[in-house]
Structures are given as C-alpha cells and as structure tokens.
Amino acid sequence: MMVFPVQAVSQVKVLVAGDVMLDRYWFGEVERISPEAPVPVVRVARREDRLGGAANVARNIVALGAKATLLGLIGVDEAGDKISTLVHEAGINGCLVADHTAPTTLKMRVLGRQQQLLRVDFEEVPGTQGLAELSVRARGLIAQHDILVLSDYAKGALSHVEALIVAAREAGVPVLVDPKGHQYQRYHGATMITPNRSEMQEAVGRWQTEEELEVRAQKLRSDLGLDALLVTRSEQGMTLFTEQGRQHTDAHAHEVFDVSGAGDTVLATLAVTRAAGLEWFDAVLWANRAGGVVVGKLGTSIVTAEELS
C-alpha cells in the first residue's frame, strides 16, 4: 500500500501563479416556476464563497501539508477583498496584485436541491500595469520556491507565461502547467503540462487508437521540450508520457458528484509529490487518487493528506 510522504511534503514550497477567481455559491430550494418566465424560482437559504482557479490550486497544496505562495490579479472590489480574506484564512502566502482597470473574476452559481441551475461569470481582460507588476513579483519569488505551478484559465493573468517559464528555468525551478487553448508553444520549456482529454484533442487533433495518441503526445512533448506530459482523461484515468515511454493508470472508481476544480486538485497533488522527490508516475498515482476523491464533493473542494492515506 502506498504511503503519502507527509514529512517530505511538509518541507515543500510551491509558487502558484495564474488566474485567481472567486467561486460564489447560492444554495436554495425550488418550489415553483416564475410567473414572469418559464424558469424556476430559487429561494436562497445559504451563501458560500470559495477560492477558485489558481487560488484553489494553492488551497489544495496547503491542505496536503505543503507551503503555498499565490501570485495573481484581483480587482479593487468586494470579490477581491473576499479572496484576500479566504487566502489568509487558508494559510496561503498571498501575493495578490490589485488591478485597478478590471474586476475580480467571479463565477456565481445558483443551486437548487444540490443541482446547479445557473452560472453567471464576471470577468474582463486584465490591464497592462497589473500584468507588468505580476511579472516583476514573479521574478523575485521563483527562486525562493521548489516548484512553480502555472494555472491557466485563459483569463489573462498568464499573458506573459513564456517569460515566467524562462525565469524558472534560469533559477533551476521545475514548472508544471495546467494549459488552456491550443497554442501550446507558449509553454515551451516547461517541465510538465497536464491537459485534459478535450484540451489535448484541441492541441493535437482527435485520435482513433492509443498508439496514435502516443505518437502525437510524444511529438508534442518533444516539440515543447518537456520532461513529461500528462493527459487527464476523466473516467479513462490518466496517461503519462515521458522519454521512457507511456504509463497509464485507470480512474479510481468513485461516484462522480461534481468535477469542477478536479484539475486543480490533480495539479496540486502532482506539484507537492514531485517536489517531495517522487518519480513522475508515483506522483501521477497520488494525483489520480486525489482526483477520485474530490469529484465526490460538491463544488471546488480540497483533498487532505489524511484522506489520501
């Protein structure tokens, strides 16, 4: 039986940079349809705010017992203040840059009887001054950490991702990236990227067989100068591609309740176990286990070292 490396993980320091957001949940009961339009009327009984995006990655890192520094942009608004408070309460070292030109990215979900009925997103492209300050702070922080995690949700905080990867390589700090879009050349020189199945298809096209996937994945890994490429495949598990070849692990058989934030948990677990000295595939096995636990929870959630062990 695998034993989670609690002692080694407790010494790990991770810098998380990327798109910080607030996940806001309104829980209520649905008892009637609106007379104004054919939509349910939700009587809100409870409200809850959680850290989302890169902030959820940092929250998971701390929950696993490591130390996390969070670098990202927030707006000068109520949602930004809430993120600052939640970051502090979670025990995360917050390096949050205030962007005076764009609001905090906010995802508001309305749920009735635990079912999501509606999601409303508030987001804008960040300003150049905020991005410039983010880059300056990153260069000062990278060398103080064991590993750099880049959480890309395509909200704009990682517009200068290439410079961050170069700075990390110069400092000898490994870089793990959760990518977005199909322009993967932006991530050239990273240590590992972790696309999900649909993101991988967007980057290399649809594959018909496992052999075809392996050829395309290894070509992408080689073209980008990566040590490793991990494709997360939901119910099909996870497939790791390295110079040594292909290694696959099946998904853990858990009831899937909510997949939101599962990629954040996987990324966090990979970062802390790899920085703690585990081989790539052993780190993937822990990440797979953590992902299997978190999809059984509602909304963006965390997994603790105790749950994994």
Image (spheres, rainbow, N blue to C red):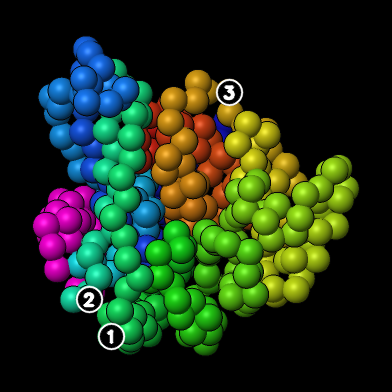
| Residue at the spot of label 2 | 101
Image vertical order of residue 188 relative to residue 110, above or below? below
Front residue of 255 and 121 = 121
Q: Residue lying furthest top in this view?
A: 31
Residue 57 coordinates in the image, percent (x, y): 38, 53
Determine the residue positioned at 85% across, 57% down: 215
Say few, some or many: other residues with alpha carbon within 10 Å of mark 2 (under 14 / 14 to 19 / 20 or more): some
| Residue 273 visible in rendering | no
Residue 51 coordinates in the image, percent (x, y): 27, 50
Earlier in the chain: of badge 2 and badge 1, it is 2
Question: The residue tagged with tag 2: helix, strand or loop?
Answer: loop
On the image, which quarter does residue 234 sit in?
A: top right
Marks 3, 2: nearer the viewer? 2
Question: The residue tagged with tag 3: helix, strand or loop?
Answer: loop
Mark 3 belongs to which amino acid? Ala
Say few, some or many: other residues with alpha carbon within 10 Å of mark 3 (under 14 / 14 to 19 / 20 or more): few
Compared across the picture, whether 123 is left or right of 183 comes to: left
Q: Which residues are magenta?
A: 76-98
| Residue at the spot of label 3 | 253
Q: Are marks 2 and 1 in contact (CB under 8 Å)?
A: yes
Mark 1 belongs to which amino acid? Gln
- The residues tagged by marks 1 and 3 sit, at their Cα atoms, a distance apart of 46 Å
Disc number for residue 59: none
Quadrant housing the C terminus:
top left
| Residue 227 visible in rendering | yes
| Residue at the spot of label 1 | 129
- The residues tagged by marks 2 and 1 sit, at their Cα atoms, a distance apart of 9 Å
